Image (cartoon, rainbow, N blue to C red):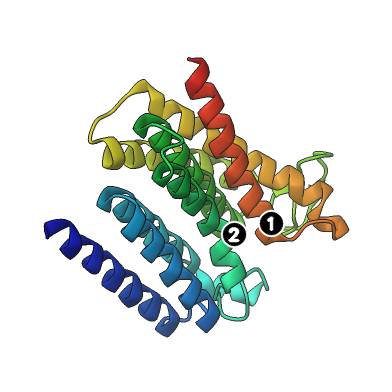
Amino acid sequence: MEFSYLVVAAVLLSAALSVLAYMLRCLTKGGAVASFLVGAIVGVFSSINAFFLLTVFTIAGFIATIKDFDKKEAEGLQEGKKGERTWKNVLGVGLPPCLVVALDCLNLIDQTAFAVMFVSTITVAGADTIASEIGVRDKNVYMITTLKRTEPGINGGVSKLGTSVSTVAALLIAVLGWYVLTESLSPLLLIPFAMGILGNILDSVFGALFENKGLMSKYTNNCSTAIIGAVLGLIIYLLV
């Protein structure tokens, strides 16, 4: 019965956070619905620890979006019209952890592999969000494929500030995520940390090579880099 209560609480909290995010204009209506579904799926089919981690990541993303929003809006660097994210944004970062939950439910991976993959998806998405929302304030931006100066906010653009904050964010998310899921600390958490850094780099590379040419959307980019991070993280785990 206690488990049932936790599941109900997770679903209700997902609904409450989604509504709040919509009221704060962090999400569109479609984005709020997608956010609720992602949270509910993780809350119902995974552990309360995984749900808690996903919730913390979501809240951190909202905070990063709101931070210095007036300045980003004045320069046209905000997400959407008022910083809001659509269902495409949500599924771009929410689908990968849901896929990992599905693998776990089907007993295709062990619990350590689940931790590696789930935390990797959260770390990749979190590091990229932080880099995009905070790093965009740095005016010294370089195209990752050419290392030539470019304008802030462009796909494939990287900066010292963005790279620094995303690396720190990746480490913090990896440590917190691993501890939340396993209730312990292990050198294995370095795998999600590395995947967070790699995922952020791949996001910029894909942006320069594919997004700017109209061959890939930002949502597909976010989703694919998180999945790549999870898969590579699993391969490294199996090899060590």
Amino acid beneath label 1: Thr
Instruction: Assess whether mark 2 and mark 1 are in contact (beta carbons under 8 angstroms).
Output: yes
Q: Mark 1 or 2 closer to N-term?
A: 2
Front-most of 202 and 240? 240
Residue 103: image location, x then y, percent: 47, 43
Q: Residues within 10 Å of mark 2 (few under 14, many from 20)?
A: many
Residue 74: image location, x then y, percent: 63, 76
**SS class, disc 2:** helix
Q: Considering the image in quadrants, where does the N terminus appear? A: bottom left
Give the number of the disc on residue 220.
Answer: 1
Would you say 33 lies left or right of 172 here?
right
Outermost top residue: 240
Amino acid beneath label 2: Gly
Front-most of 113 and 87? 113
Q: Residue at x 37, y 30 (%)?
A: 112
Give the distance between the C-alpha atoms of the residues marked 1 and 2, in whole angstroms.
Answer: 6 Å
Front-most of 153 and 12? 12
Would you say 128 lies left or right of 141 here?
left
Q: Residue at x 29, y 49 (%)?
A: 47
Q: Which residue is mark 2?
A: 92
Is residue 160 visible in the rendered image? The answer is: no
**SS class, disc 1:** helix
Give the number of the disc on residue 173.
Answer: none
Q: Quadrant of residue 36?
A: bottom left
Residue 149: image location, x then y, percent: 80, 47
